[in-house]
Amino acid sequence: MKLASRLDHIAPFQVMAILAKARALEAAGRDIIHLEVGEPDFATPAPIVAAGQRALAEGHTFYTAAEGLIELRMALAQWYRQRYDVAVSPERIIVTTGASSALQLALGLLVEPGSEVLLADPTYPCNRHFVSLFGGTPVALPVGPDTRYQPSAAQVATAWCERTVALMLASPGNPTGTLLPSDTLAELVTLCREKGGALIVDEIYHGLTYGVDAETALRQADDAFVINSFSKYFQMTGWRLGWLVVPEGWQEPAIRLAQNLFLCPPAPAQQAALAAFEPATLAILEERRAEFARRRDFLLSALPALGWKLPLVPEGAFYLYADVSAVTDDSFAYCQRALDEVGVAITPGVDFGEYGAKRHVRVAYTTGVARLAEAVERLATLRG
């Protein structure tokens, strides 16, 4: 037997290896502070859980349409009207098994062997891996704090070629937590249209912003492919539910592809998600967003004492992307030491690309301030 060559382009997800090792150390009796995985530490809000329990008790355990329950798609359309003042037809919303499935759908619709997709470096690693999975080539655009870790229109124009089929953006981004400025988005929308390419925008951290509201790309680009999820803001990671908004006219091929790839999203999770937009649920989520802001602000003040550089304040998500070159020239080895020696799990920059990877680590502030303070105290012992 021979392993398919496409696996040559799929790198291991280092954060999952770190998580596995951290859990093994915990099983052996070590106290580990988890700052590695991008998962909220809050349980799914009670109203959503109760709706899921009712769904199971009432027998909502059968297949749904591939594009998801119409009730949920209508609720999402209403969410776009209320939160963003943007009109999105429910027919353009495809409910998926997590945002990962939404990403696969978008790329499956656009990418073929020989295609190129432009994306930031650093960015979420699965983005480039999914491009490779469909036979395309991910083209990395090195970004730094000077552009808030987001591609510029000039950079995209330079990298675009006849093989380019799409530009992929993330706002707020992972691992940096930065938002794409509205004027930059407008320039990129115009550029994609002039080039005849698609715009794919990852908005899965919408709702988790601090001091500023995130603008959906749909306000400026009704023809964009927009990915979102119930995992982060709505804190339903294990329920595996997301959605993809497709441009008008792309519904049929998107549904056809979804039917063949995933059949349908999980029925009980869809029923549960109907409760995500209730006032009681949103009140809980807003309290938790305020807590994430407190955690971010604590780390912004505490981490520089370690010699770490934080060149800008991230507006969203729950990550800090820090330059640790003052304390190490190998962030991967530094993360291994942090876990082995002081029991703090953080993610090396290599997970998110190549540009500046050895100088950076990502910290997920998905635990309380007391534990964050303890983590900083432990990491201080690694200096030198």
Image (tube, rainbow, N blue to C red):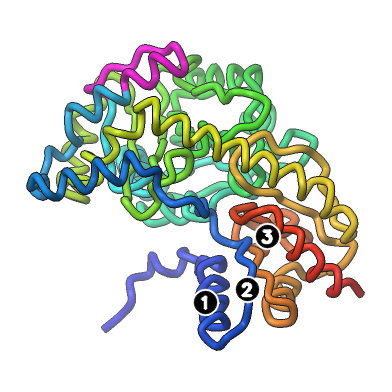
Sequence order check, earlier mark of 3 and 1: 1
Position of the N terminus, as image quadrant, is: bottom left
Classify mark 2: helix, strand or loop: loop
Q: Are marks 1 and 2 in contact (CB under 8 Å)?
A: yes
Kind of residue indicated by mark 2: Ile
Please indicate, yes or no, whether residue 167 appears anywhere in the rendered image: no
Distance Cα–Cα, label 1 vs label 2: 8 Å
Write down the residue under mark 3: 349
SS label for mark 3:
helix
Q: Which amino acid type corresponds to the residue marked 1 in the rendered image?
A: Arg
Left or right placement of residue 33 versus residue 90 in this view: right
* Residue depicted at x 33% and y 76%: 3
The residue that disc 1 covers is 23
For the residue labelled by badge 1, is the local secondary structure a helix, a strand or a loop?
helix
- Residue 176 x/y as whole percent: 66, 45
Q: Residue 327 appears in which quarter of the rendering?
A: bottom right
